[in-house]
Image: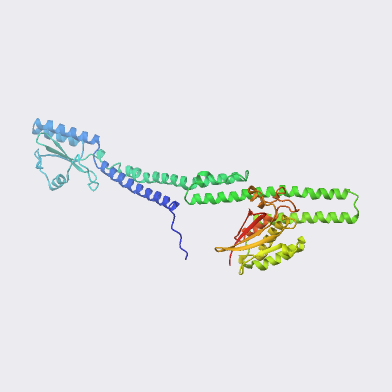
């Protein structure tokens, strides 16, 4: 089973992992903090409850100063106002007024908590609280009135703090994730829809291309694809313009021939010549368009350059009328390259025809081969006038004919363009450089 590559330093994996980890830590930490804070704050009596209890303690202290009867009377009045249970004891938990304390009263006194301390949720429904009063710090111990229960809003606060907060954090996490992932894809989708109206415009936003993560890689791939599409559309338009221009001349000659007083044989010869020329032009244009659009994959095999050169020379001598001695070669033994025989022969044939067409009237064409690392470098050189340095790449463009620099011939400027594409599809390269004299077409192909 193939293993997945380790994510790179700029991979989205790390950013998403950090974002997810930060979200989890923030959610857990915030929930824990808010839960503890709510529990702590809701376990204390409210300010209103403390003020009321302190007022009761002040009243008890005032009644104590007026004597025991006044203290008993006040306690009875308190039980009328706050029905439940209440006693007055000293700091030893002994009653201040004549009253017998049963076991239940003693148990309640033991469970009583200072009114300023937090009250546990494990306490009974209405907890027992003690409030000091007087100079002796005696205690008013009573069951807390129901309206002062500290836990009555705890469930609502917990729901708001502990459950609502993760929802808000999730929304923030989703917004950040949307901005990180979906927003660039939305802009890319918008650009793609706009591409239908303006097919030559840039598809990918610049900020997406500059990213170093997977989205940046996607952006650069789509930018490359857009560039290929833009180049293909531009080239097709240029081919149509050039083809229409090249066809006008033979069509005009055909019209003139049809309107001229030529006899049947002459007219037939002229028509046959022009039709053959247009046929070659259309075939070359269709071949070039097919190579650019389909990018075919040719099965490669060992090709012997010496044997292939001999075959090409025989055909070239037959077509051009050159003697065989004018086509020279210096090919080392064992010169074999990895290529497709027919397409490589077609490419080298176009180069050889171009060299013959632009050679001097009594010139020669030479093929030399030398080993360069894992490749063979083949150089086909003529002795013509050469090409200006600034036009060395232009000669590989379709319909490029530099008649001012390389006179002669009746080609359409498609042979070298087709040759370069055929060689590139076999994993090789083709470039030109000026010699002393003439032009050298250098082919580099992988050795066997």
Q: Residue at x 44, y 44 (%)?
A: 175
| Residue closer to the observer: 232 or 117 | 232
Q: Give above or below for 135 relative to 394.
A: above
The answer to whether residue 294 shows anywhere in this view is no
Total numbered badges shown on the rendered structure: 0
Q: Position of residue 244 (x, y in %)?
A: 75, 48
Q: Nearer the viewer, residue 225 or 316?
A: 316
Q: Position of residue 149 (x, y in %)?
A: 25, 41
User: Quick one: 116 or 297, which is closer to the camera?
Assistant: 297
Q: Nearer the viewer, residue 141 or 27?
A: 27
> As drawn, is 151 to the left or to the right of 249?
left
Query: If the image is split into quadrants, where does the C terminus sit?
Result: bottom right
Picture quadrant where residue 417 is located:
bottom right
Q: Residue at x 60, y 63 (%)?
A: 370
Q: Is residue 114 above or below residue 25?
A: above
Q: Is residue 71 left or right of residue 273?
A: left
């Amino acid at each position: 089973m193939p293993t997945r590559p380790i994510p790179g330093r700029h991979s989205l994996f790390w950013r998403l992992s950090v974002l997810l980890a930060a979200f989890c830590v923030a959610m857990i930490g915030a929930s824990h903090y808010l839960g503890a804070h709510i529990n702590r704050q809701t376990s204390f009596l409210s300010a209103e409850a403390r003020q009321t209890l302190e007022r009761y303690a002040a009243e008890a202290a005032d009644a104590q100063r007026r004597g025991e009867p006044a203290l008993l009377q006040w306690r009875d009045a308190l039980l009328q106002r706050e029905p439940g249970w209440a006693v007055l004891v000293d700091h030893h938990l002994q009653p201040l007024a004549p009253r017998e304390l049963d076991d239940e009263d003693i148990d309640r006194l033991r469970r009583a908590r200072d009114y300023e301390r937090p009250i546990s949720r494990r306490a009974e429904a209405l907890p027992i609280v003690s409030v000091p009063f007087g100079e002796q710090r005696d205690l008013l111990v009573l069951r807390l009135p129901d309206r002062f229960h500290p836990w009555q809003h705890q469930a609502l606060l917990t729901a708001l703090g502990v459950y609502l907060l993760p929802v808000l954090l999730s929304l923030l996490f989703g917004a950040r994730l949307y901005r990180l992932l979906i927003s660039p894809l939305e802009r890319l989708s918008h650009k793609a829809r706009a591409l239908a109206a303006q097919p030559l415009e840039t598809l990918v936003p610049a900020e997406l291309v500059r990213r170093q993560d997977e989205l940046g890689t996607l952006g650069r791939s789509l930018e490359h694809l857009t560039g290929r599409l833009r180049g293909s559309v531009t080239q097709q338009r240029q081919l149509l313009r050039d083809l229409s221009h090249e066809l006008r001349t033979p069509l005009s000659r055909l019209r003139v021939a049809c309107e001229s007083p030529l006899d049947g044989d002459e007219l037939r010869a002229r028509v046959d010549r022009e039709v053959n020329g247009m046929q070659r032009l259309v075939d070359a244009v269709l071949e070039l368009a097919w190579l650019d659009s389909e990018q075919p994959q040719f099965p490669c095999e060992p090709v012997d350059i010496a044997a292939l050169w001999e075959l090409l020379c025989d055909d070239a001598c037959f077509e051009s009328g050159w003697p065989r001695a004018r086509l020279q070669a210096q090919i080392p033994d064992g010169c074999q390259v990895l290529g497709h025989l027919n397409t490589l022969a077609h490419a080298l044939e176009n180069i050889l025809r171009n060299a013959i067409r632009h050679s001097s009237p009594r010139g020669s064409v030479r093929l030399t081969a030398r080993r360069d690392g894992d490749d063979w470098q083949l150089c086909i050189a003529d002795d013509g006038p050469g090409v200006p340095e600034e036009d060395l790449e232009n000669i590989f463009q379709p319909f490029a004919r530099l008649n001012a620099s390389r006179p002669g011939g009746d080609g359409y400027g498609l042979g070298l363009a087709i040759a370069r594409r055929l060689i590139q599809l076999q994993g090789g390269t083709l470039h030109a450089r000026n010699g002393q004299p003439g032009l050298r077409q250098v082919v580099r192909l992988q050795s066997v």
